[in-house]
Amino acid sequence: MNIRVLDSLQTRQQWIEFCRREQPYCFVRQPDVLVDFQSNHLQLTLLNRQVRHGQQALKYSVGSRTSVAPAWQFIKACQFDLCRMVELLQQQDFDGNARDNAALGIIRNITIRQFFAKERSVISPAFLGPLSPLSTPPEFWDLHSACRLLANRQYDDLRCDSRSHPSPAPDPRALLLALIENPENWQLQQRHNRLYIFRDQKHLYSLIPDIAVDTEIPDRALGYSPTPNNAMELSP
């Protein structure tokens, strides 16, 4: 599923165009929120340029079981400004899973809920970006560089080195996704001409970087990359 990314949702016209889409479901860059208006409820998932797994995200649901009108009235009351909606919802004191909107003082017959999202696959667009080929070997290998290497097939002799669980060479796509989804679990170390890949300090895989490999058809469809702040750098 391709999810559209909008720069903002701050005007009436932007909301009308959004709601006219076949699926009113999109990421918004500012604020960093996933907006879902496919039912009577407006659902806002706060990503805050930090979320790599959807289940880490705080989510709000605003609406009514019987009509879409209360949710739309909420949008209008916030002057169509998504930033204002998020700010207002974050100011509420949620003592339970759901409560009537009397505390908001905006509109009746509307229910607001606060909970953690269930969609594990949701990731902040702040982490999205093309994994472009490496033109030169990095001074220090980090996870972002390793992902670029794998995505563009700039390597040779990828193999499994685990003695406790010997297996054939790993699927490079599966390994790439594992590095992207759980960067905190992976470490790298270079020895001579090989790059060694560790998970939780256990040596699992290795490969030989080959920056000269032809990259006419880079595997950029995956589109996610660990950020330098979360990548681990190990001296060769």
Image (tube, grey):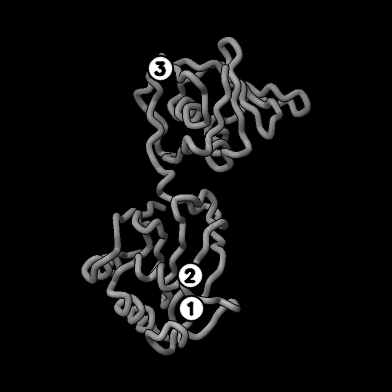
Residue labelled with disc 3? 136
Name the secondary structure under disc 2. strand
Residue labelled with disc 2? 60
Q: CA distance from mark 3 to mark 1?
A: 52 Å
Instruction: Inspect the image, locate mark 2, and give the three-letter code of the amino acid beneath it.
Output: Tyr
Residue 227 versus residue 9 in the image, above or below: above
Q: CA distance from mark 2 to mark 3?
A: 45 Å
Name the secondary structure under disc 3. loop
> Which of the pair 137/132 is nearer the observer?
137
Please tell me which residue is depicted at 45% across the width and 17% down the height of the picture. 137
Residue 219 versus residue 9 in the image, above or below: above
| Left or right placement of residue 214 versus residue 156 in this view | left
Residue labelled with disc 1? 112
The tag earlier along the polypeptide, 2 or 1, is: 2
- Location of residue 66 in the rendering, given as x and y in whole percent from the top left corner: 44, 86
Residue 113 versus residue 219 in the image, above or below: below
**Quadrant of res 157:** top right
> Which of the pair 32/133 is nearer the observer?
32
**Mark 2 Cα shell of 10 Å, populated few (<14), some (14-19), many (≥20):** many
- Location of residue 19 in the rendering, given as x and y in whole percent from the top left corner: 30, 69
Name the secondary structure under disc 1. strand
Q: Are marks 2 and 1 in contact (CB under 8 Å)?
A: yes
Residue 150 versus residue 12 in the image, above or below: above
| Left or right placement of residue 161 versus residue 96 in this view | right
Q: Are marks 2 and 3 in contact (CB under 8 Å)?
A: no
